[in-house]
Image: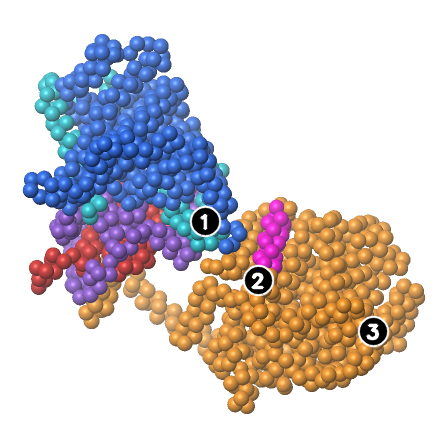
């Protein structure tokens, strides 16, 4: 075992050990102890990740891969899978984000879960999630990735339903799990197709065998596999039409929402597509589907976000919308931009979720923004950091969100796989984002206080504010590693787009049009000014003239009703999909199951019972008689092997 | 076998030596009358009351089991200690220490668990 | 003195077979246990001869010095005397048992005659520091098994204490 | 018929045969003794026989894996003896005798 | 054992001489013990028979020899007689594996019309590659003598004493085995001669990958493993059932422990076993921590052999070995004296205190010693500069 393997082992092992320690001690009420163990594990993991990435940086760009095979997992005929791990440029970003943001959120949780009933269980789940997420991103083949993929699904389920005594929360957990299963089925089918076509599930082998298939010209299986994998991605990353679980997932503790449902797990789909970018670029039709679904989801979720009153629901729809951006980027071939937005989004969305957690904590579990307002005075640190997050997400120039979002918009316009229409949808979605985020900000922190008299909001303890501050700084400057060329050209020193350089060797490319920088600037200007106008409107509505929104809502009429009821998507699913399935299942049960299957099984059991009755005399509890059977069996086996 | 032979020879020699001594002692020893009282088990002068094994705490047995388990863990450390220098020279010092650290953590946990659970108490 | 080789082997083999047979034939469990100790010490000698010096030492320490001490201790605690009926009843099943064991042994011996790896040329004898080699393998290739065994021992230690505590357990109060 | 030469040239076969004989003794002990402790000892005998074959293979194929395996087997044998004797002690405490037939009474 | 008749017979004789030396030391030690205890307790001790009471030993031997032989009626005759013999063997076997001096080199010579040699005779009964493990293994068999004696006597004091003794022996075997890990970490060898060789010369060790030498101190293990040495020595006390750990024969409760029913020479053999253990312990302490037969900083093996330069090489080698053997024995006797001294200085432990000391104090300390040693060695020997 060399040094890198050791780093891998520490990286993956630390959260696992933390999980075992807290899991074995799950009855403990000592949130400080279990929290420190879990946070320590996450930080150790982060250090290992950093060291690993440091090793990676020292390698030449084209050879930036560190592989480590731990053991042979399964070998069936030609099919063999190793428990092997791979760090390259893409997963390096992921592990840093997962362990870094993860550590901060663990730290935040120590304060947030201080008064909970079963903190050890919570931290055990959180560490298990970290382990599975790392498995997902580090897996060197699709199967290891799938294990992580399922593992994070499990942890997500456990954590959404963490307060399972509330039936609604338990139901939300199940909804997330079942919706994810649909996507997982697609993912598995995709793996099968890939294995059938290429005979391997290892990423490196897969990508090296792709060109030979592309030469033949028949890309049917590739398109099919890409679409199947994308179904998996829509499930995990909450895209149309499988996004419905994510808003409900807000039933879990807020740090969980920040970690799992904003920063890491939901980006797994994006990560998977980026990881298999070589596959997707060979399937332009699938790419188009990805882009369209992404753009549509971005807009769709953003409009729903306009009317939500629950602080976490707003953020949840915002997450869905931002994930849509990432898929839009991936769909137009801007994989680097997708990764970039994934990273910046992890920073500012985790920040906003944690900020909302801080608010909810201060408001004694109140999540309705109509009952907040003016919290700026009571919670200065939370407000300041949330403000930074707000600036980042609405695309205030030079903040992280601006960098990544505008790169996506520009690529969706300029890429050969892009289209001005996609750009337009993106810009409208950006404007909506700006509006609802400003609305959230205004209703929560600004204006007059609508806080009920009996609650006394207060600033959160340092364990909660420190992560906020760190994430706030990251949201401010995190975008500077990927400054677009046109802006970089204006800044003294001409900083390069480091991220693009870093990722380039690991990604497949789509031909890009060399757009003029004037065009890029003007597009940028359009989106920024639209966002600014939207923000101004929101400010005007909710701070300056609080009576106006009602009038506007009335003016929109039925459309407003549709939006505020989330387009009745849940109801439609219930009526059109779930109910028919339930009815059909009932029919199957009444006729097929009772009439045929049960009879068959009864017959089988009768046979077994009869045979068992005869054999029962052998099971007389006499140990030595059992030993004799073993001995006779051994004798027969030896005879058979050696002589027969 | 050449290394082992002297050990066997010595063991046989020592055994013979011991038997010889006992034979000599029985040869020269006083030949007293054997009476039932003389041959009865020593019990500080009173009649033997009960079988020797009536009241023996099974405590000893638990000690023996724990001894076996810890003994093996210690034996596992011997090859490690033997090859420690070689591992360090090969640049694998951190690795081998880490591997043993995990093992030792289990060992220490076990030991302190036994102490805490009062399995090692003698009252 | 290399000519002692085969003679030594036959002497050891005869001793081993005698001791092993005595273990199962002796009606007194104390004698059985003592014969087993002797078997294990002799086996340690054979291991030593087969270039497994360290394993021979471990055999002495662990088997002869620890496991068998436990056995002897338990037998003494229970005051188990000579057994009137040491063997199970049933002539037919007894014959069947002996026959199956003999069958296994016979076939094993019979087939081993064909094993062709018996050349001394490929022996470990040339290897100077076997114990160090052993350590290198144990802590690299088998490191996982090594850790898991540590865990197993922990579990058994905890289990032994737990068994002693349950109702009707070894240390339960009467 | 084994020739004189094969009797003089001690090779792997001889050790394996010895191991097989000891193993079958252990097996007979397990199958036929009534005393649980003696049965456990017979199991140790069988394990020792297997260890002997491991060591013999290890020596004659110049491969240390066998010795490591023996190391592991010893560990597990010790654990097994500990647990087995614990059960035997419990049986003794209940029935004042260590006969295998009391194991029929065990219910979990 | 050797390649020709000369070597074989020398080796055999050597073995027997070393064993007899060990046996002969026992009466001497008994005398030292008795005189020493008298000295410590401000008494006279045996002083009637011979000068300084030295002939007392012979008188004792005669007394032992003429004691009446008998086996308790309820005892198990065979086990009763085997136990004392078994008591002798482990100590003798263990002692035989320890080098008592530098090896003797015999040059080739002609004798009885034949060419003999050259030979190298190790100054020990036999050389075993896995020395430490062998000694541990051999001495772990000592528990059987106690158990058999206790069981064979079929007396409740004997049995109880035997169980106590064996439980105590095995409990301290853990601390013993674990403190040896520190020695192994330091010397990375199972072989005694190798360990002694590493302790020759001035103190020299690696400090952060660089060699550092302290010329005025010997390179003895004690300076690296002081805690380990103390723990090991204490564990040896318990292993040999010496005071303050002689609970198995606590008179107040157990009469005389496992040898309650023994008398005469059989009893004496248990004593030989016990003193044999003490000798093994002292020899091991000397070998592991006090440089074995080396005597630096005043003299090295070479300078000793240079005294005998006028003799033939064979004679010089022999004389050097003898001188070094005396040095070794001096160290060993020092430790044996400490055994005696402690016996008459410290009170006896209670049994629970004894078990607590073994399991809850010494074992954790030995563990700590191992861990600290490993970490220090890792830091000191690793080549941090990376070249």
Circle 3 chain: A
Q: Colour of chain C?
A: purple
Using the rendered view, name the quadrant where residue E202 is placed.
top left
User: Residue furthest toward the left?
Assistant: E113
Q: Which chain does orange denote in the image?
A: A
- E296 vs B84, nearest the viewer: E296
Q: Magenta residues, as a range?
A: A33-52
- A482 vs E293, nearest the viewer: E293
- Give the foreground label among 2 and 3: 2
Alpha-carbon distance for marks 2 and 3?
39 Å
- Where residue A638 appears, x then y in whole percent? 22, 65
- According to the image, label 2 marks what residue? A55
- Where residue A208 appears, x then y in whole percent? 52, 79
Q: Mark 2 near mark 3, Cβ–Cβ under 8 Å? A: no
Circle 2 chain: A
- According to the image, label 3 marks what residue? A528
Q: Which chain does cyan denote in the image?
A: B
Q: Residue at x 58, y 79 (%)?
A: A278
Q: Main secondary structure of the magenta part?
A: helix
Q: Mark 1 near mark 2, Cβ–Cβ under 8 Å? A: no
- Where residue A23 appears, x then y in whole percent? 55, 52
> Compared with residue A167, is residue A527 higher up or lower down, i.e. above or below?
below
């Amino acid at each position: 075992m060399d040094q890198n393997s050791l780093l891998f082992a520490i990286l993956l092992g630390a959260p696992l050990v933390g999980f075992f320690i807290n899991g074995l001690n799950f009855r403990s009420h000592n949130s400080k102890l279990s929290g420190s163990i879990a946070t320590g594990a996450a930080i150790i993991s982060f250090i290992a990740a950093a060291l690993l990435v440091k090793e990676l940086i020292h390698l030449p760009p084209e050879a930036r891969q560190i592989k480590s095979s731990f053991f042979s997992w399964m070998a069936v005929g030609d099919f063999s899978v190793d428990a092997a791990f791979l760090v390259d440029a893409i997963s390096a970003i992921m592990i840093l984000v997962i362990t870094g943001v993860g550590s901060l959120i663990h730290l935040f949780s120590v304060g947030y879960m201080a008064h909970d009933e079963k903190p050890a269980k919570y931290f055990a789940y959180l560490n298990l999630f970290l382990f599975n997420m790392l498995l997902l991103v580090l897996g060197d083949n699709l199967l290891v990735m799938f294990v992580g993929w399922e593992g994070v699904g499990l942890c997500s389920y456990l954590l959404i339903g963490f307060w399972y005594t509330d039936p609604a929360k338990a139901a939300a957990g199940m909804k997330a799990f079942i919706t994810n299963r649909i996507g997982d089925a697609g993912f598995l089918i995709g793996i099968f197709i890939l294995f059938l076509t290429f005979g391997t599930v290892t990423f490196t082998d897969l990508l090296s065998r792709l060109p030979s298939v592309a030469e033949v010209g028949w890309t049917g299986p590739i398109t099919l596999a890409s679409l199947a994998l994308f179904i998996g991605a829509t499930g995990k990353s909450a895209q149309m039409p499988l996004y419905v679980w994510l808003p409900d997932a807000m039933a879990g503790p807020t740090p969980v929402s920040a970690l799992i449902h904003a920063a890491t797990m939901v980006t797994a789909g994006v990560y998977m597509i980026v990881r298999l970018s070589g596959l997707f670029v060979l399937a332009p039709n699938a790419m188009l589907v990805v882009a369209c679904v992404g753009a549509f989801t971005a807009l769709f979720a953003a409009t729903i976000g306009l009317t939500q009153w629950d602080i976490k629901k707003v953020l949840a729809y915002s997450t869905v919308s931002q994930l849509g951006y990432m898929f839009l980027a991936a769909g137009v071939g801007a994989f680097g931009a997708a990764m970039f937005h994934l990273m910046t989004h992890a920073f500012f969305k985790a920040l906003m979720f944690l900020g909302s957690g801080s608010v909810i904590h201060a408001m004694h579990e109140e999540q309705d923004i109509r009952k907040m307002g003016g919290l700026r005075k009571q919670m200065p640190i939370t407000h300041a950091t949330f403000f930074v997050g707000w600036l980042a997400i609405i695309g205030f120039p030079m903040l992280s969100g601006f960098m990544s979002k505008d790169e996506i918009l520009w690529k969706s316009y300029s890429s050969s796989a892009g289209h001005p229409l996609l750009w337009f949808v993106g810009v409208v979605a950006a404007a909506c984002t700006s509006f609802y985020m400003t609305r959230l900000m205004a209703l929560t922190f600004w204006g007059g206080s609508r806080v009920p008299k009996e609650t006394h909001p207060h600033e959160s303890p340092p364990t909660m504010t420190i992560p906020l501050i760190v994430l706030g700084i990251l949201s401010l400057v995190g975008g500077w590693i990927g400054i677009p060329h046109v802006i970089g050209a204006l800044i003294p020193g001409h900083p390069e787009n480091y991220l693009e350089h870093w990722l380039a060797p690991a990604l497949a490319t789509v031909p890009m049009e060399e757009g003029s920088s004037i065009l890029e600037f003007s597009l940028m200007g359009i989106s920024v000014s639209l966002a600014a106008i939207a923000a101004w409107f929101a400010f005007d509505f909710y701070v300056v003239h609080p009576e106006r929104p009602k009038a506007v809502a009335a003016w929109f009429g039925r459309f407003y009703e549709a939006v505020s009821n989330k387009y009745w998507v849940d109801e439609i699913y219930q009526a059109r999909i779930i109910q028919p399935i339930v009815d059909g299942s009932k029919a199957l049960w009444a006729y097929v199951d009772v009439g045929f299957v049960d009879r068959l099984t009864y017959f089988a059991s009768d046979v077994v019972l009869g045979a068992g009755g005869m054999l029962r005399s052998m099971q007389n509890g006499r140990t030595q008689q059992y030993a004799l059977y073993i001995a006779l069996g051994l004798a027969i086996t030896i005879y058979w092997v050696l002589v027969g | 076998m050449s290394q082992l032979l002297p050990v066997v020879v010595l063991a046989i020699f020592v055994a013979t030596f011991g038997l010889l001594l006992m034979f000599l002692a029985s040869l020269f020893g006083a030949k007293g009358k054997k009476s039932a009282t003389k041959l009865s088990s020593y019990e500080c002068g009173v009649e033997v009351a009960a079988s020797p094994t009536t009241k023996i705490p099974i405590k000893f047995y638990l000690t023996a089991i724990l001894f076996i388990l810890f003994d093996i863990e210690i034996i596992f450390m011997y090859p490690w200690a033997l090859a420690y220098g070689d591992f360090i020279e090969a640049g694998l010092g951190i690795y081998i220490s880490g591997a043993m650290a995990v093992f030792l953590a289990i060992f220490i946990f076990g030991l302190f668990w036994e102490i805490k659970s009062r399995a090692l108490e003698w009252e | 003195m290399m000519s002692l080789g085969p003679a030594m082997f036959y002497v050891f083999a005869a001793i081993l077979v005698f001791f092993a047979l005595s273990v199962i034939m002796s009606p007194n469990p104390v004698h059985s246990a003592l014969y087993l100790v002797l078997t294990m010490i002799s086996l340690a000698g054979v291991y030593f001869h087969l270039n497994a010096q360290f394993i021979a030492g471990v055999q002495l320490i662990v088997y002869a010095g620890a496991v068998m001490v436990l056995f002897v201790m338990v037998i003494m605690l229970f005051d188990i005397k000579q057994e009137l009926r040491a063997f199970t009843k049933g002539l037919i099943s007894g014959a069947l048992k002996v026959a199956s064991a003999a069958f296994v042994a016979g076939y094993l011996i019979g087939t081993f005659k064909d094993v062709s790896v018996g050349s001394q040329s490929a022996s470990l004898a040339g290897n100077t520091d076997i114990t160090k080699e052993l350590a290198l393998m144990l802590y690299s290739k088998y490191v996982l098994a090594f850790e898991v065994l540590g865990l197993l021992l922990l579990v058994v230690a905890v289990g032994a204490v737990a068994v002693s505590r349950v109702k009707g357990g070894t240390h339960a109060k009467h | 018929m084994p020739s004189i030469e094969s009797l003089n040239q001690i090779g792997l076969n001889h050790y394996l045969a010895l191991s097989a004989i000891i193993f079958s003794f252990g097996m007979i002990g397990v199958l036929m003794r009534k005393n649980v402790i003696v049965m456990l000892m017979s199991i140790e005998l069988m394990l020792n026989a297997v260890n002997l074959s491991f060591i013999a293979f290890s020596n004659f194929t110049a491969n240390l894996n066998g010795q490591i395996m023996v190391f592991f087997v010893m560990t597990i044998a010790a654990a097994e003896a500990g647990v087995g004797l614990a059960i035997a002690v419990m049986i003794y405490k209940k029935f004042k005798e260590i006969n295998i037939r009391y194991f029929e009474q065990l219910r979990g | 054992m050797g390649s020709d008749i000369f070597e074989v017979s020398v080796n055999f004789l050597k073995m027997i001489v070393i064993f007899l030396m060990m046996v002969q030391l026992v009466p001497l030690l008994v005398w030292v013990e008795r005189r020493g205890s008298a000295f410590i307790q401000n008494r006279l001790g045996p002083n009637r028979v011979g000068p300084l009471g030295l002939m007392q030993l012979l008188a004792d031997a005669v007394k032992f020899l003429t004691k009446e032989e008998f086996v308790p009626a309820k005892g198990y005759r065979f086990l009763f007689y085997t136990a004392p013999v078994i008591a002798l063997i482990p100590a003798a076997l263990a002692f035989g594996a320890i080098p008592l001096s530098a090896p003797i080199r015999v040059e080739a010579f002609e004798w009885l019309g034949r060419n003999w040699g050259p030979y190298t005779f190790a100054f020990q009964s036999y050389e075993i590659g896995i020395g430490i493990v062998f000694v541990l293994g051999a001495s772990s068999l000592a528990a059987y003598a106690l158990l058999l004696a206790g069981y064979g006597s079929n007396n409740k004091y004997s049995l109880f004493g035997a169980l106590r003794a064996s439980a105590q022996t095995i409990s301290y075997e853990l601390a013993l085995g674990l403190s040896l890990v520190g020695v192994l970490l330091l010397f990375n060898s199972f072989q005694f001669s190798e360990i002694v060789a590493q302790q020759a010369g001035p103190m020299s060790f690696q400090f952060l990958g660089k060699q550092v030498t302290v010329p005025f101190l010997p390179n003895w293990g004690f300076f690296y493993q002081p805690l380990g040495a103390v723990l090991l020595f204490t564990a040896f006390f318990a292993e040999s059932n010496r005071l303050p750990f002689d609970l198995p024969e606590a008179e107040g409760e157990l009469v005389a422990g496992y040898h309650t029913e023994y008398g005469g020479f059989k009893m004496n053999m248990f004593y030989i076993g016990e003193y044999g253990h003490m000798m093994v312990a002292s020899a091991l302490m000397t070998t592991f921590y006090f440089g074995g037969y080396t005597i630096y900083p005043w003299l090295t093996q070479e300078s000793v052999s240079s005294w005998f330069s006028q003799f033939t090489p064979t004679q010089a080698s022999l004389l050097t070995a003898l001188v070094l053997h005396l040095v070794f024995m001096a160290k060993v006797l020092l430790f044996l004296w400490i055994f005696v001294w402690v016996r008459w200085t410290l009170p006896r432990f209670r049994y629970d205190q004894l078990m607590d000391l073994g399991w809850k104090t010494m074992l954790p300390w030995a563990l700590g010693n191992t861990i600290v040693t490993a970490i220090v060695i890792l830091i000191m020997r690793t080549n941090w500069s990376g070249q």
